[in-house]
Amino acid sequence: MATVPPISVMSFHLNRASLSHSTVNLSLPFMLDGDGDGGEAPSRCPRPIAALPNEFNPSYLKIYYNKLFPHADLYRWMSYGNDGKHPACDSSYLGRRKFSYTLDNDIFVRYNTFNSAAELENSIKDKCPLKIDIGPIYNLNIRYESLNASAGDNVLTPVERELIFDIDMSDYDDVRYCCSGADVCLNCWPLMIVAVKVIDTSLRDDFGFRHILWVYSGRRGVHCWVCDRKARRLTNEQRAAVADYFRVYKENENNYKKVSLMGQVLHPFLARSYTEVLKEYFETKLLTSQNLLSSKERYEKILEMIPDQSIASELRGKWQESRRSSSAKEDINIVQWEQLKQLLQKHKAQGVRRCVEEIVFTYTYPRLDMEVSKHMNHLLKAPFCVHPKIGRVCVPINPNNCEEFDPTTVPTLIQLLEELNREGLRSDVEGEWNKTSLANAIKLFRSSFLQPLLKICKEELESSYNAKLQQSKNLLSW
C-alpha cells in the first residue's frame, strides 16, 4: 500500500513588533499587499491579490481574530447560561474562569479573566495570542491571584472544570511505522478515530454524559471536553476514578506486554470496545496500513507478546517459510494474522487465548494523558485556535461520523485569508466566516454542541430559581 505523505509542517516566524495596531487598519475594508508590514494605506475598494505568502505573518493572526474567530460562541459556552439574562444567573461565574495566553517569544500570560463578552473579545483581538488555554473556575475572581498565598477562606481553589481528555498521536509511536513524533498521515489517523469512538461511547453509555465536544488539536491529536453540569463539578478524586476506568496499560514501560486484561472475561466496556471498534480497525485498516507483520523486526515484536514460546516458534517458522513461497496477490499481514489467531484461539490456556485480544488492544486502544483528566487545574487549548506550527485551525469533530474527518483538509490560516481575499473583506458585515471553509466547523459547534448545551443550562437555572422561590414561600408560610 502506498504511504500517504504526512501533513506538511510549516514553521511560523513571528515578529513581536509587527503585532502593533499600525500593522493593518482593521477599521476599513482592505486587502493585504505583500507581507502586510506597512506600505500604502488600505484601499476602501476590495482588491484581490494573487496569493498570500506562505510564510506566516503576525498580521494574518490579527485578521483571523478580528474577522473569523467565534468570540461570542466561546463566551456563551464558558458562561453556561450565566449571561445576566436570568435572575438565577451567577454574575461572577465567568470572572472566576482562568484563561491563559501564549504570546510571541514564549511569553505566557497565565491569569486572564473577563466579566463580559466584550472584555473577552477585546482582549483576544488586542493580544493576538498564539494559543488560548482554558483552565478551571475558581472560588474567587482570579484577578486577585495574590490571595492564593493567603490563609483561611481566601485560598484560590478550583471548584469547577470540564472533564477533559487529551490524546496525542506521538504516544502511539511504538505501534505506528508511517510517521513518528509530530507527523500524522491518513495511515495512522485511524488510531484517533478509534479513540474518539471508544471514549465517546463509554462517556455516553457508561457514565450518562451528553454534552461532549471533540476537537482536533490542530496537528497530531484530539481533545475532549465533557461539559455536563455533573461532569464539571467532579472532584479530583472522582476525575481520577473516571480516568482509571479507561486504563488498560501497565505502568512498567519496560514490560513487553503493555496491556493487562484481567479476569476470566473482559469487562463489558472492554468487550464492547473490542467487538465494535478495535477488532475491525485493527484487521481492516491498521494491520495493512502499518504493515504490522511485513518484516521480521515487526512480527518479532508481536511474537514476544505470546506467553507460550512453542507457539511463537511455530509461527516464526511458518512466517519465515511464507516469505519464500507466498503469492504476490496475498497480503502477508492478513495471512500471518489469520495463522496467529488460529493457533492461539484453539489453545486451552486462557492466557494464551487472551493474547489475541491483548495484541489488538496494544495496537489500537486509546492512550490517554491520564494526568490531564485527573486534575481540575490542567489547561487545555480552546477550540478554533490556530496551531502555531502548521497553521491548521482546531476545529470540532463530529463523533457520530468521525471516520469521515480528514486532518489533511482542515482549514489553514493562510487558506482562510485567501478565501476572505476572494470574497472581499467587509468591516461592516458580521459572520464573515460563513464565506470561508471555517463555516462548517462553526455551524457544527453551534448545532451539535453549543445550542443543546445552553438549552439544558437554561432549564437548570430555571429549575434552581423555582426551587429557591418555593423555599422562600415555605419559609414565609411558616
Image (cartoon, grey):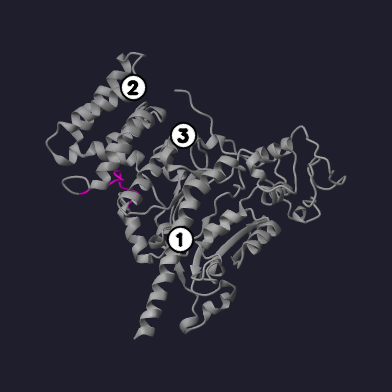
Taking depth in this image into account, of 138 and 103 the one nearest to the observer is 138
Label 1 sits on residue: 457
Where residue 393 appears, x then y in whole percent?
59, 44
Where residue 441 appears, x then y in whole percent?
55, 43
SS at mark 3 in the image: helix
Amino acid at pointer 3: Glu
> Mark 2 or 3, which is nearer the eye?
3
Q: Residue at x 68, y 60 (%)?
A: 122
Point out the residue furthest to the left here: 348
Where residue 27 appears, x then y in whole percent?
79, 52
Label 2 sits on residue: 332
Magenta segment boundaries in residue numbering: 252-262
The main secondary structure of the magenta stretch is loop
Magenta segment includes 259: yes
Image quadrant where one finds the C terminus: bottom left
Q: Residue at x 50, y 75 (%)?
A: 156
Taking depth in this image into account, of 300 and 391 the one nearest to the observer is 391
Point out the residue furthest to the bottom here: 478
The answer for how far apart the CA atoms under marks 2 and 1 are is 54 Å
Q: Is residue 400 above or below residue 240?
A: above
Label 3 sits on residue: 404
Classed neighbour count for the residue bearing mark 3: other residues with Cα under 10 Å, few (<14), some (14–19), many (≥20): few
Amino acid at pointer 2: Ile
